[in-house]
Amino acid sequence: MTTQQTIPVTQNAAWGFWGTMNEHASAAWPLAMTAISDATGQPLESVRAFLDSRHGRHFADHVQNGLYEGKALADAIHAATRQWMAWTIGRQTSKDYGIPRGLPYLTGFVIHCEIVEESLAA
């Protein structure tokens, strides 16, 4: 028996991933949430924090670039996810954000956004 997790809703509809995706936002949100969670192994709430952040806006820019190139929405999201997982955290980013060097970029920023959100809630 499989259990289906509920996709958290955005808490930043005017900015971040949702705001950048414009008319594609409602269709793109669950696709991006599951693609990123599957790729990083991080929970959906952590992915939501990432997508609602300025980093989520930059991720959406990559998805929009894929759409501009003629990719279908799901393909554009998967391409952006693969690209962000292929990049690794470098020395300067590690120094600026405290994310371990060499970690996949997407994983690092999903975890970073979760930590930032938790620290603001404390």
Image (tube, rainbow, N blue to C red):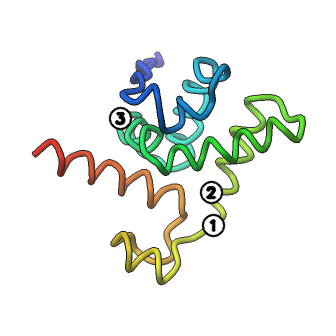
The image position of residue 94, as x and y in percent, is: 42, 76
Residue type indicated by callout 3: Glu
Q: CA distance from mark 1 to mark 3?
A: 23 Å
Which residue does the numbered mark 2 point to in the structure image? 84
The image position of residue 120, as x and y in percent, is: 18, 47
Tags 2 and 1 touching, CB below 8 Å: yes
Tags 1 and 3 touching, CB below 8 Å: no
Picture residue at 37% right of the left edge, 54% below the top: 111
Which residue does the numbered mark 3 point to in the structure image? 45
Element under disc 2: helix
**In the depicted view, which residue is nearer to us: 98 or 102?**
98
Res 87 label:
1
Picture residue at 52% right of the left edge, 78% below the top: 90
Q: CA distance from mark 2 to mark 1?
A: 5 Å
Picture residue at 54% right of the left edge, 62% below the top: 105
Res 22 label:
none
**In the depicted view, which residue is nearer to us: 112 or 104?**
112
Residue type indicated by callout 1: Trp
